[in-house]
Amino acid sequence: MELLMYMADSIYITPTDDTIVAPATTPGTSAIAVIRISGKETFNMVNTLFKAKDLTKQATHTIHFGTLREGNTILDEVLVSIFKAPNSFTKEDVIEISCHGSDFIVRKIIQALLKQGARLARPGEFTKRAFLNGRFDLTQAEAVADLIHSDSEASHIAAIHQMRGGISNEIKNLREKLIHFASMIELELDFGEEDVEFADRADLQKLITEIQKVLSSLIESFDVGNAIKNGVPTVIAGKPNAGKSTLLNVLLNEDKAIVSAIPGTTRDAIEDEVMIEGVRFRIIDTAGLRETTDTVEAIGVSRTRDKMKQASLIIYLFDAATTNPYDLEKELQEIAQLNIPFIVVANKSDQLLPSSAIYQWPESSQLIYISAANKLNIEELKSRMLKEVKAEKFVTGNTLITNIRHYESLRQTYQALQTVLTSINTGLSGDLLALDIRSALYHLGEITGEITTDDLLATIFSKFCIGK
């Protein structure tokens, strides 16, 4: 639908009195499609086409059946849902037209509205208007996009929590406390000649330490939150013939990878996704780790090590019946240096004999014994995977940072507060102290949108789909 296509990097302007229109459903043939209109001329424009009744005289939040006509031509039989300002998503007059799901019909209705003076909405412009009109703050607006794209229970929970103000409430609470002290210090500056102190420095130092503790927790949650939002990159690594491809197939419950007794069968990464109790894992089967003169296999081994460095979780699999403890320990030491959570899994445990080398190892609660071929203890492995990514945080309603923009602003806030502490300890004057606190307040305000720029809003909302 050429009529509805835009450049993703369109430059945003602050919404004016324009009335905007866009399809709110995905293009393509379907039972119904929804067209959304928002702006002060919404009711007049739709009334010109809708012949059943005068929509301006109908109650808000009601649905009306009738035909849309352009002259004597019937465009479609439709249902018209009306939402009068300020009781709508954008806090403007909004109408949603439910028509038959033909691209041709959608195009004809939108063309008719454009002739009435509407213009095509830019990506995310409905949500942008909702933000600018005070429907919610910027973190909640961003959560709308996250909710649309959520494809797992965990990412859905995180988006819902953010959309309902989980992050906003945390940030606003911290910001209000800082504003109080900032105002006291600003007051001191007004009485500079009288050498008075309204903001107790010890209390300020205590508050900043408390705020930094909360910030640290939020910052640390980003690794988990970002992995859950985008899926947890999980690499299955180990020596050739450890059973990596078999484990991948078992976790996916399908024959995704070729399984062979010939070492070096897997020469490139094989990737697919699996849901484990609502958390999406991106499972990556890799080439076996070993020294090789085969050029192609060597490239595969190199890629394996690259994938391990990029992973959020590593499952190190080894053959329990044949692996030498010394060789295993050496490999695990290398993995530990990556500073990435990893699980050590002893495969083919069903083939163990009392004389096997495995019995030379001390018992460890960290070691998981499985048989991928016989699907033994696979559920235990899945539970351990969930534990390693701290999935329990998603069912307890904890606030998690999933957005890189929020993460960067929190880091900058923390650093600004550290400067405030240094200023207090070195006895800097109140005017310099006030500057440092203002910097921290600025970065906190960026998160919720109390501090914004046109460029920032353009970047955020250009990532939304048209009609949202």
Image: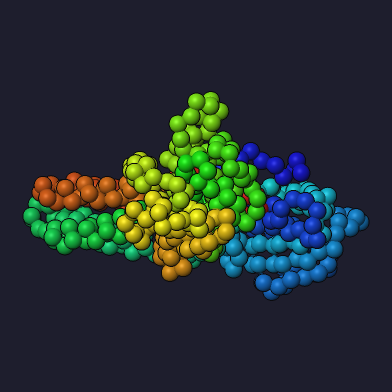
Question: Residue at left 46%, top 35%?
Answer: 290
Foreground pick, 404 / 265: 265
The residue lying at 71 percent from left, 73 percent from top is: 62
409 displayed left or right of 55: left
- Residue 248: x, y in percent? 57, 50
Quadrant that contains the C terminus? bottom right
Q: Position of residue 312 (x, y in %)?
A: 44, 48
Q: In the rendered image of this protein, does residue 393 appear above or below residue 450?
A: below
- Is residue 184 among what the camera can see? no
Residue at 47%, 48% (x, y): give it: 319
Is 266 displayed left or right of 345 in the figure? right
Residue at the image position 76 percent from the left and 62 percent from the top: 98
Kindly indicate the quadrant of the structure image that contains residue 392. Answer: bottom left
Which of the 4 quarters of the picture holds residue 326?
top left
Image height of 4 relative to 449, above or below: above
- Is 264 placed above or below 224 here? above
Please tell me which residue lies in front, 367 or 160.
Answer: 367
Quarter that holds the N terminus: top right
Please provide percent x and percent y for residue 386.
46, 60
